[in-house]
Image: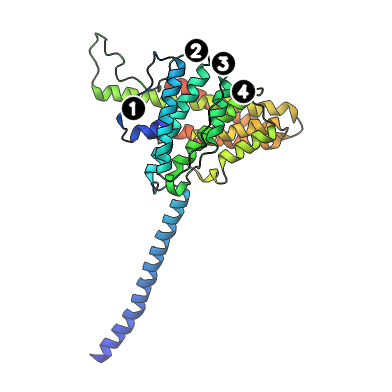
Amino acid sequence: MSLATSITGCAKRSAESSASPAMDMAPGDELAVLEQQLTQREAQLQAAGYRPAPRERVSRDGAESKPVAPIPAVDEPSPMAGATSTAPAPPASKQMEDANEGGRCRQVCEITTAICELEGQICGLVPRHPEDPRYQAACSRAADDCRFATEACNACT
Amino acid sequence: MIGLTRPTVANRMPARGTWMSLLAGVMLGALLMLVGLAQAGRLAPSRPEVLVALAQTLEVEHQRVDLLLAQKDIAGAIAALERLRGTEWPDRAVAGEAAEQLRHDVYGRLLRLRLDHPKVDPRTPDQLAVIASEGLGDDYKTLGTNAFTARLVALRGEVSELRGDDEAALLAYDEALTMNRGLLQQALTGAAP
């Protein structure tokens, strides 16, 4: 979930703001709806005393309609997940606990990905600086971090 | 009585002075703490409505960028994010740390796209470095540890590599690694990121 989404999720939203473009809309229509929403949002920002970015039409490569994937949904566990299951539902508190644990594990594993990517980037510098021990030391530290984070991610999931 | 009173009064005068000094010291300390916290953006934003308006604007713009990317319109997505560079970003005192994190999110996304698609509306490595510095701002190091700043710092490392400055790249990667280490600790201990 993006930070913007989490912040706006906390704010009381007007009816129009919660309306998302319909999934079966043509891409051009979806863009038009979003641009309309954007204009409204920017007006709010301006009313709050801040200048939004200057408006200009975004140049698009090829305006013809193409099959388009739906706008990515916020990747939160759906409250409806498993609703059709015939198995007895666990207590709400247990479900919430599991969701929190799942969210935490996802977070741990996302951070692990970032750490291990950094390890790759740091260690990628080493061959260019074989004479400088700082690069090798940083690479070793990063490798330790990646190993620890990976273990944490594996233990969590 | 006078003899008793005088020493008593005399004794109380320094005591009152001590208390006054102590009180003044406490008040000064509290004031400095509040100023420090406000400068660090750790207090609630003074104008939360600005943060909400900004976040709502960016949420829609991110959706639009998602849609443009789904249409393989990389140039359009980059242009949309470039346009956001012209936003008048509220400072920390007004909208809190979250406003800066939102900026780091936008600039991080822009730089990622530019690095992944160097032939689309090309920029020189030096121009990319300007984008990274502009996005991070001067005092990003005083922000609480967060994933958006960590990502932008790591991207600055990539830009430094492109410029042939491995020294700066190593520093940036190491800094981003330290931030991510902190984030991992927070996640493992269940502390808020």
Q: Which residue is mark 3?
A: A62
In the image, which is nearer the foreground, mark 1 or mark 4?
1
Q: Depth check: B8 or A115 in front?
A: A115
Q: Is residue A141 left or right of residue A14?
A: right
Q: Depth check: A40 or B162 in front?
A: A40
Q: Are marks 1 and 4 on the same chain?
A: no
Q: Which residue is mark 2?
A: A65
Chain of the residue on which disc 2 is drawn: A
Q: Secondary structure at mark 2?
A: loop
Chain of the residue on which disc 1 is drawn: A
Are the residues flagged by discs 4 and 2 in contact, CB closer than 8 Å?
Answer: no
Q: Secondary structure at mark 1?
A: helix
Chain of the residue on which disc 3 is drawn: A
Dot 2, crowdedness within 10 Å: few (<14), some or many (≥20)? few
Q: Are marks 1 and 2 on the same chain?
A: yes
Q: Depth check: A139 or B36 in front?
A: B36
Dot 1, crowdedness within 10 Å: few (<14), some or many (≥20)? few
Chain of the residue on which disc 4 is drawn: B
Question: Residue A48 appears in which quarter of the rendering?
Answer: top left
Q: Are marks 2 and 3 on the same chain?
A: yes
Q: Which residue is mark 4?
A: B116
**Label 2 – label 3 distance at C-alpha:** 8 Å
Q: What's the mark number on residue B134?
A: none
Amino acid marked by disc 1? Ser
Q: Which residue is mark 1?
A: A18
Q: Depth check: A40 or B29 in front?
A: A40
Mark 3 or 1, nearer chain start = 1
**Label 1 – label 4 distance at C-alpha:** 32 Å
Q: Which quadrant is the N terminus of chain B positioned in? A: bottom left
Residue B27 drawn at (x, y percent): 38, 63
